[in-house]
Image: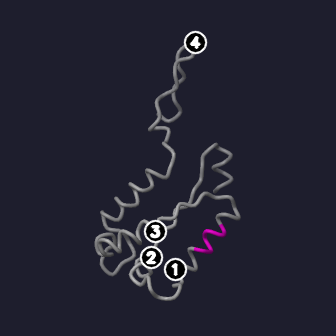
Amino acid sequence: MRDALAARGTAFAITLLPVRQALEAPGSPEPPAQQTRRRMHALTAQLGIRTLDAWDLFAAAVQRDGAARYFRPQDIHFTAQGHRLVADWLATQLPPTRRDMAPPAAAASGPAPTPRWR
């Protein structure tokens, strides 16, 4: 996927999301989720893939507000607030999309080209 996207001039990144149970037991010895997190960082670094790690974001939020605000009951999936938290964070981590950018200026020799993203 990384190579196919690069051939099209599209950036590729992976986002690591934490597991609720690991966030709720921060004082225990390294849980398997943390081991997986470290392995993912090593693998993506080896492959030259940008990695966005939301673990610390969620760890701080869960410590402040509790896991129930960000995760569904007895589940690993996010609540609406959990989705909002990660979406707002990703918006600060990712470059603007083509839809966020202004269309190219008109060329001096003719009409402006039609943007590819419309």
* For discs 3 and 4, the disc positioned in front in the rendered view: 3
- Name the foreground residue: 80 vs 60: 60
Tell me whether circle 2 and circle 1 mark residues in contact (CB < 8 Å).
yes
Q: Which residue is drawn at 58% across and 80% down?
A: 35
- Residue 77 versus residue 118: which sits nearer the camera? 77
Residue underneath mark 4: 108
**How many other residues sit within 10 Å of disc 1, few (<14), some (14-19) or many (≥20)?**
some
Whether residue 97 sits left or right of residue 9 in the image: it is left
The residues bearing labels 1 and 3 have C-alpha atoms spaced at a distance of 13 Å
Would residue 3 be found to the left or right of residue 83 on screen? right
Q: Distance between the residues labelled 4 and 1?
A: 56 Å
- The crowd level at tag 2 (other Cα within 10 Å; few <14, some 14-19, many 20+) is some
Dot 1 amino acid type: Ala
Residue 19: image tag: 2
Task: Give the residue drawn at x 29%, y 75%.
Answer: 68
Image spot of residue 38 (x, y percent): 60, 74
Q: Quadrant of the N terminus?
A: bottom right
**Residue 32 in which image quadrant:** bottom right
Residue 5: x and y in percent read 63, 49
